[in-house]
Image (cartoon, rainbow, N blue to C red):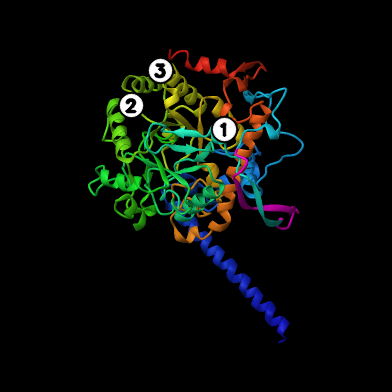
Amino acid sequence: MNITNVLIILGFIFFALILLVLLIGTLYLFFIDRKQKQHPILRNYPVIGRVRYFLETIGPELRQYLFNSDLEGKPFSREEYGHIVKKAKYKRDVLGFGSKRDFEEKGYYIRNSMFPKLSEELKMDQHINVTTNRYLLIKEPLFTQKEERLEKNDSLAFLLDDSDAIVIGKNTKYPFIVKGQIGMSAMSYGSLGEKAITALSEGLAIAKGTWMNTGEGGLSEYHLKGGVDIIMQIGPGLFGVRDKEGNFNWDALKEKSKIPEIKAFELKLAQGAKTRGGHIDGEKVTEEIARIRMVEPFKSIDSPNRFREFHDFPSLFDFMEQIREQTGKPVGMKVVIGSGHEADELAKYIKSTGKGPDFITVDGGEGGTGATYQELADSVGLPIKSALPLMDHALRKYGVRDQVKIIASGKLFSPDRVAIALAMGADLVNIARGFMITIGCIQALKCHSNACPVGVATTDPDLQKALVIDEKKYRTANYLISMREGLFRLAAAAGLDSPVHFQSEHVVYKDEKGKVWSLKEIYQSLVEKVD
């Protein structure tokens, strides 16, 4: 018998064994599916019904990459996601042929000036430069890898002029002076892994003039890696400033206040996507995270949905005063606005007591989170474009707007969205998910599971191997610099020499019938019932 016949016989036996295994496996699944009681579809359609569950499992990926249009996906469409990536990777975001926005739909527009400002007329810091790495796209063939080259890039940091610098806590011993209007929103170490926090810290430091918020999980060494300015958030769980019994620890607060990178403290009353205390699953609570938070390792953490240290505005303001006296640094609060009445009450107490926050972070209901419940994320708390005017109006109504800075957050990931928020009353803007995308987030929507496939929202060391800090940190810097450059570009188009001058008259609203309303009219319609 020659070698050819032997190979034919072996091949036949091999495929016969495969068919036999498949047949036995199918019969086994058939009887298992027929007898199980959990899934009706499998009892009626054994084996074949499993195809349905398989397609259901991979459905999100199919929709994201194949079936959703560029403008459909949520929380971020492919178009929105792509603009963030282009800013981060290429340090530019130029489109061709025309906008994909549906101009028949209602929406906000920035009012352009007949006589825009020239580049040399813009009022910005002309001395601070930054050096980053960016990719230069050479070729983008259909079937092979993109041809790109990594290159050094020098540019202005696009920071505010010294005369326009924003001062938070001007009457405190150590005011926080900010020259960039965009910073990183609260993201805790634990919700994000150490590589993600480190890449963000170092990237923000490269861009200069900005800040990162620690989130309620406490200050970690990874937040400090880059030397960027930090707002330390304190949530109801008091992580990082508590004793072993869970009580507020004033000595721990004083120790944290001595760290030069910490410029301010923020009390988290609520978050847009979860108007309750924070949650982190036990598998994310490593021994290091437990040490930082002063909790037990590998046990799920649910912080209370309210501080035990205060229960109303007077007691809240007294608590703030104590923190300010102990640290000498500005103290703010993060809130979700549910109605104009709440904003009015807050402003009234600031006026009557002469106390209160140095800054208020207004978080919209459309904001993101590592983990929350559907009913809270979808239906509790107003979105930012409704909440922001209510807060700004209330502070102006009681004559305390000048002493309180407003930081807005809630899907403000592009320069035009930032400009509209500034026109609605914000002084500064926080971004979270935009920065997550710069370090590799692909919207897998697994932030709550510790199974983030790109190593961002996970503490799993194996998954974190995917995240290369020395590459991603430059993407964070590029995104932020491009955002600030775009903000100045919009200011010039509106006839302004700096984005600090955006006001309600610089934005209009077009309804679905084509009628144009000034933002001032929209603003007034939002707040008139409060008065």
| Residue 157: percent from left, percent from top | 60, 43
Of marks 3 and 1, the one in the foreground: 3
Where does label 1 land, which residue? 418
- As drawn, is 359 to the left or to the right of 309? right
| Residue 281: percent from left, percent from top | 38, 49
Does residue 512 lie above or below 99 as drawn?
Answer: above
- Type of the residue with mark 1: Val
Does residue 292 lie above or below 97 as drawn?
Answer: below
| Residue 128: percent from left, percent from top | 59, 45
Please state which of residues 486 and 123 is positioned toward the viewer in this rendering. Answer: 123
| Residue 340: percent from left, percent from top | 42, 20
C-beta proximity under 8 Å, tags 2 and 1? no
Where does label 2 land, which residue? 355
The outermost residue toward the left is 245
Q: Is residue 241 magenta?
A: no
Using the rendered image of the protein, determine whether residue 203 is visible from the camera's viewpoint.
yes
Q: Is residue 145 magenta?
A: yes
N-term-proximal mark, 2 vs 1:
2
- As drawn, is 53 to the left or to the right of 142? left
Mark 2 → mark 1, Cα distance in angstroms: 29 Å
Q: Quadrant of the C terminus?
A: top left
- As drawn, is 437 to the left or to the right of 350? right
Name the residue at 27% across, 32% down.
310
Q: Which mark is residue 398?
A: 3
Secondary structure found at label 3:
loop
Graded by Cα atoms within 10 Å as few (under 14), some (14 to 19) or many (20 or more), the crowding at tag 2 reads: some
Secondary structure found at label 1:
helix
